[in-house]
Amino acid sequence: MASAPATTFFPKHRHPPPPCRHFHNLRSSKSTTISCTSSPPIITTTTSGNNRQSIPSLLPFSAKYVPFNAVTDECYSLDDIIYRSRSGGLLDVQHDMEALKQFDGKYWRTLFDSRVGRTTWPYGSGVWSKKEWVLPEIDNDDIISAFEGNSNLFWAERYGKHHLGGMNDLWVKHCGISHTGSFKDLGMTVLVSQVNRLRKMNKPLVGVGCASTGDTSAALSAYCAAAGIPSIVFLPANKISMAQLVQPIANGAFVLSMDTDFDGCMKLIREITSELPIYLANSLNSLRLEGQKTAAIEILQQFDWEVPDWVIIPGGNLGNVYAFYKGFKMCQELGLVDRIPRLVCAQAANANPLYLHYKSGWENFSPVKATTTFASAIQIGDPVSIDRAVYALTNSDGIVEEATEEELLDAMAVADSTGMFVCPHTGVALVALMKLRERGVIGKNDRTVVVSTAHGLKFTQAKIDYHSKSIKEIASKFANPPVEVAAEYGAVMDVLKKHLKKVS
């Protein structure tokens, strides 16, 4: 096993370049020279005197596209503009694991930990702090980053104690605390950086396009705006929140509002990008998942590289389920941890094709017609990454659960009442947790992480409607509307005394 010290990094455009470090092995009187680069470099060893001895050069880090979960010699460069294999199947980004295994788990843990929160370009990003595992061959000057990631792992002590039977090791990964307010930033920094590289290579790309239920378009438009790359967004009309709609508009995207659902938008963007030089940015593109998998690695870092028992992820197009699996699995294969957690995918009952597939014993998957759900970002009936999600769940002894509209809204309200401010999709995941706790599948002392995918501020109308009890057929039993009171001392005192007696 080759070993190397943690590497020192410098911001882009700093001159002159950093000097090499020299390390001396006093026992053998050998010197090893290691040049300072973002990847572990070539090492040569010489002995003193006339005897010269060299050890094999370290393999450079690299990655390529391969057909997903297939045994074949088919592969493509990441610089190729391609989204499907020859057979029409999904592609996956495959890293040269033998090159990465030249360094042990302790080396990678130390390296990743050394970069957290730094201002050194681009390693302070939660994504690019794992650059060697994401896009190892991209030049730092081509990276488009808002230092995304490094999101809070919130100890949901009060929620677990009061609402989940005394559960004391419950955590919520707030991926919505990011540049555009959702986990989509993690994947979009990778995809847009690669497009930036391709355009510099004079590849025929005039812009980047996506179909979106809101968060993808926000992330795409922001990163494209930062890079000066045109973005095109296909949105289902009247099916996303105003807070989500305004983001791509404000960032200068060309927005097309269509009288269809997400699945219809997805069908159209795939047809358009096959004819026009517009790069497809949906999670069909496996580059996105390379960024999203870093959230899993972050969770392990935040637990000092201890593995949680469960990770619960809201699922719509289902790429994120596989991304989390891939992040955990890479850490296991490269010796950073010795196991992976069990995964749970949570779906809204109004858009539950994976749940139905799971309940059938993974037999004969059938898309569904997704109906309106407050968890609008996962209102998808024909998920692109269905095969990826099934693979991740079957290889992690995973489970799929669902949540009704009333269940997810109540769970969101209860979570908010304990100090959080979560999105409806997090409500879906919390319902899955509650049901698994009630059945005894998840134990009281199991370390459990719920992935919160977006910031609650994107869904304020849903919260307003819930607390004003204006949603038909929803009881809103945890509603907390403001109390109207006359602007008089006596009236205010009467209301406050009544309230304080109730809560004491």
Image: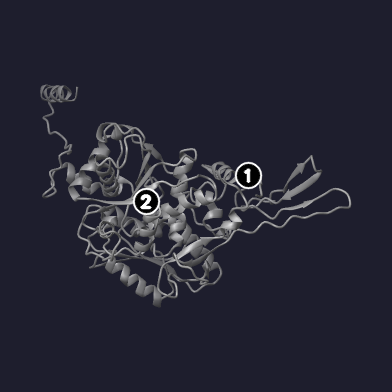
Q: Along the horizontal axis of the image, is 104 left or right of 92?
A: right
Q: Amino acid at mark 2?
A: Asp
Measured as percent of width and height from the top left, residue 328 is found at 46, 49
Which residue corresponds to the image point at 72% horizontal and 57% vertical from the top-left? 56
Measured as percent of width and height from the top left, residue 71 is found at 48, 68
Q: Quadrant of residue 318?
A: bottom left
Q: Quadrant of residue 380?
A: bottom left
Q: Could you classify mark 2 by the number of other residues whose Cα lies within 10 Å: few (under 14), some (14-19), or many (20 or more)?
A: few
Q: Could you classify mark 1 by the number of other residues whose Cα lies within 10 Å: few (under 14), some (14-19), or many (20 or more)?
A: some
Spatial CA distance of label 2 from label 1 is 35 Å
Residue 186 visible, this angle: no
Q: Along the horizontal axis of the image, is 82 left or right of 373?
A: right
Q: Amino acid at mark 1?
A: Ala
Which residue corresponds to the image point at 53% horizontal and 58% vertical from the top-left? 135
Q: In the rendered structure, are the residues bearing label 2 and label 1 in contact, judged by CB atoms less than 8 Å apart? A: no
Which residue corresponds to the image point at 19% horizontal and 50% vertical from the top-left? 405
* Secondary structure of residue under mark 1: loop
* Secondary structure of residue under mark 2: loop
Which residue corresponds to the image point at 36% horizontal and 37% vertical from the top-left? 446
* Residue at numbered disc 2: 397
Q: In the rendered image of this protein, does residue 34 appear above or below residue 370?
A: above
The foreground one among 110 and 150 is 110
Residue 458 visible, this angle: yes
Foreground disc of the pair 2, 1:
2
Measured as percent of width and height from the top left, residue 356 is found at 25, 59
Residue 94: mark:
none
Q: Residue furthest right?
A: 50
Q: In the rendered image of this protein, does residue 445 appear above or below residue 190?
A: above
* Residue at numbered disc 1: 6
Identify the mark nearer the N-term, 2 or 1: 1
Q: Quadrant of residue 26?
A: top right
